[in-house]
Image (tube, helix red, strand yellow):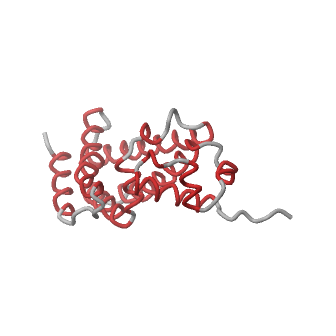
Amino acid sequence: MGRQPRFDEGDILKAALHRIAAQGPGAATIAGIAGDLGAPTGSLYHRFRSKDLLVATLWLDVAEEFQEGFLSVLGGGDPVEAGRSAILWSLDWCRRNPERARLLMLHRRSELLEGEWPDEVAGRAAALAGRAEAGMRRFAKRRLGSVSKPALRRVRLALVDLPIGAARSDIEERRVPSHDLDSLLPAAADAILDGP
């Protein structure tokens, strides 16, 4: 009977998240993560064939977690309230998950991966993007009555770009997003969505 692995996939991903959140994407090396765990590098390569696969898996895990909650709130009840609630949910998620927020809100895929999505996770990445697009389209149809390019642009600006931009400086400075955003952002989003 083989030995139980000392570090499971969750331990490795948590160590990678901590390292990226603390030191940036360049610190996400197999040797560095293994050193943080006190594990031989071979044990990490046994679970992830490359650093790109490890980091892509981590990013997708975090993005899927965020997306599931966000789209659930966005799909609820009255579309005006759903949009406001989705913004507040995003801010609260960032406050509850500071390391995950740093990974998701501060780093683009190109900063984390050397090339395209590894084959093992390319399907997950495509599904994630597809769910995001479908969720935005459903909301645009409910809130604006249209899925035109301008309508989708407004939705993305109000629900994604505006909250991320507003919270970014706090997240960069390792502060929780300011609570004054809880009233400012929904009002700003309503102005964008209700504008001419």
Location of residue 154 by image quarter: top left
- Counting from the top left corner in percent of width and height, residue 149 is at 29, 32
| Left or right relative to 189: residue 26 | right
Location of residue 183 by image quarter: bottom left
Camera-nearest residue between 131 and 118: 118
Quadrant, the C terminus: top left
**Figure disc tally:** 0
Camera-nearest residue between 40 and 62: 40
Residue at 55% from the left image edge and 56% from the top image edge: 13
Residue at 55% from the left image edge and 41% from the top image edge: 52
| Left or right relative to 37: residue 177 | left
- Please determine whether, in this image, residue 163 is positioned above or below residue 183: above
Quadrant, the N terminus: bottom right
Residue at 40% from the left image edge and 53% from the top image edge: 23
| Left or right relative to 154: residue 147 | right
- Please determine whether, in this image, residue 116 is positioned above or below residue 88: above
Location of residue 94 by image quarter: bottom left
- Counting from the top left corner in percent of width and height, residue 51 is at 57, 44
- Counting from the top left corner in percent of width and height, residue 69 is at 42, 59
- Counting from the top left corner in percent of width and height, residue 39 is at 64, 59
Name the residue at the right extreme: 1
Residue at 21% from the left image edge and 66% from the top image edge: 179
| Left or right relative to 165: residue 77 | right
